[in-house]
């Protein structure tokens, strides 16, 4: 068994491996700029991989993704991959994070043995759409909603996001560069104005033609408690349904009782709990 850095000739093997060991991981890992990737090779075949992906808003964090083919597990390959990956991480990283379904016992055992600890748990919630778009209530008097182009959207989104979430533990500030890299794949946020003042935002997009995603939605503190978050969610659900979404996913920290109550009231249902682990140094 040999641990080495990934090479361009590994592209097809790496993609096939992703589909087997981490099917929820979408996209081409080799296309992620500066993402360290280590692979495990046995008799010329790639049997495992570990990669560190940048985390938007947390420049010193990297998301650990990877896995080992089932037939080769419990042989120390995952541990060897993790150690090699850490040796090749940029010096700017001081934390590895890993997200798994709460019931994934083998992965939990590996993370605990490797020194990871639980940071928080998130609820994944899903809204199942019907044949018709949800009715969109009229905006309160004096409120309007707008899309902006990328250059204008990025600084406004950052300002509203920071104002809304900076006091909370789930705050992950974005940079303009991160937003510009995400806009082509995830569309651009929708903003709510009162008179000429921006007061709320929501970011939503369509994946795979049938699956909508909402992340995040927020209302600045001075305008909270007026039903504007609900209004923005109705807007997103209506537009995503018109685009062909049959279901819409949203995530929230398990401790965020207010958000969970709001999502439940709109028909979202808890589908799974994701545990976020971290390793700091």
Image: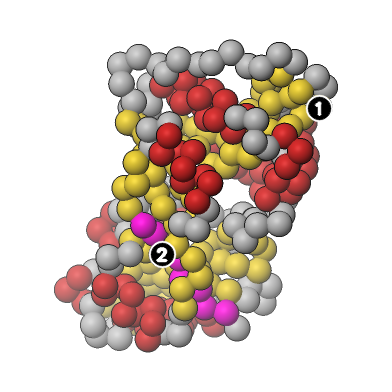
Q: Position of residue 55 (x, y in %)?
A: 58, 59
In the displayed structure, 93 sits above or below 131; it is: below
Q: Residue at x 38, y 26 (%)?
A: 245
Cα separation between marks 1 and 2 = 37 Å
Apparent side of residue 235 relative to residue 111 in the rendered image (left or right): right
Q: Residue furthest front?
A: 225
Q: Nearer the viewer, residue 143 or 60?
A: 143
Earlier residue among tags 1 and 2: 1
Considering the image in quadrants, where does the C terminus appear?
bottom right
Question: Is disc 1 placed on a helix, strand or loop?
Answer: strand
Q: Nearer the viewer, residue 194 or 28?
A: 194
Q: Is residue 98 magenta?
A: no
Which quadrant holds residue 90?
A: bottom right
Considering the image in quadrants, where does the N terminus appear?
bottom left
In the displayed structure, 33 sits above or below 179; it is: below
Q: What colour scheme has been applied to the protein in the rendered image?
A: secondary structure
Q: Nearer the viewer, residue 112 or 193?
A: 193
Q: Nearer the viewer, residue 212 or 30?
A: 212
Apparent side of residue 31 relative to residue 104 in the rendered image (left or right): right
Which quadrant holds residue 202?
A: top right
In the displayed structure, 76 sits above or below 56; it is: below
Q: Which residue is mark 2?
A: 275
Q: Position of residue 63 (x, y in %)?
A: 51, 64
Mark 2 neighbour density, 10 Å: few (under 14) some (14–19) many (20 or more): many
Q: Which residue is mark 1?
A: 197
> Is any atom of residue 123 visible in this view?
yes
Apparent side of residue 54 relative to residue 238 in the rendered image (left or right): right
Q: Residue at x 31, y 21 (%)?
A: 130
Magenta part of the chain: 273-280
In the displayed structure, 224 sits above or below 192; it is: below
């Amino acid at each position: 068994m040999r641990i080495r850095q990934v090479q361009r000739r590994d592209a097809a093997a790496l993609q096939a491996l992703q589909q087997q060991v981490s099917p929820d991981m979408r996209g081409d890992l080799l296309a992620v700029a500066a993402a360290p990737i280590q692979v495990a090779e046995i008799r010329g075949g790639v049997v495992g991989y570990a990669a560190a992906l940048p985390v938007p808003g947390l420049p010193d964090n990297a998301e650990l993704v990877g896995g080992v083919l089932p037939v080769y597990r419990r042989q120390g390959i995952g541990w060897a991959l993790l150690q090699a990956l850490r040796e090749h991480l940029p010096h700017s990283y001081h934390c590895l994070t890993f997200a798994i379904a709460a019931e994934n016992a083998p992965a939990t055992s590996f993370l605990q043995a490797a020194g990871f600890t639980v940071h928080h748990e998130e609820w994944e919630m899903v809204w199942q759409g019907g044949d018709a778009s949800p009715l969109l209530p009229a905006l309160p008097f004096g409120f309007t909603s707008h899309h902006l182009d990328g250059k204008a959207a990025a600084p406004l989104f950052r300002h509203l996001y920071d104002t809304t979430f900076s006091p909370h533990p789930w705050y992950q500030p974005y940079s303009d560069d991160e937003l510009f890299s995400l806009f082509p794949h995830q569309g651009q946020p929708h903003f709510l104005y009162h008179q000429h003042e921006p007061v709320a935002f929501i970011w939503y997009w369509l994946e795979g033609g049938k699956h909508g995603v909402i992340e995040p939605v927020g209302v600045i503190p001075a305008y909270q408690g007026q039903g504007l978050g609900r209004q923005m969610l109705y807007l997103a659900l209506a537009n995503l349904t018109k685009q062909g979404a049959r279901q819409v996913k949203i995530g929230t920290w398990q401790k965020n009782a207010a958000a969970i109550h709001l999502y439940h009231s709109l028909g979202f249902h808890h589908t799974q709990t994701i545990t976020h682990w971290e390793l700091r140094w």
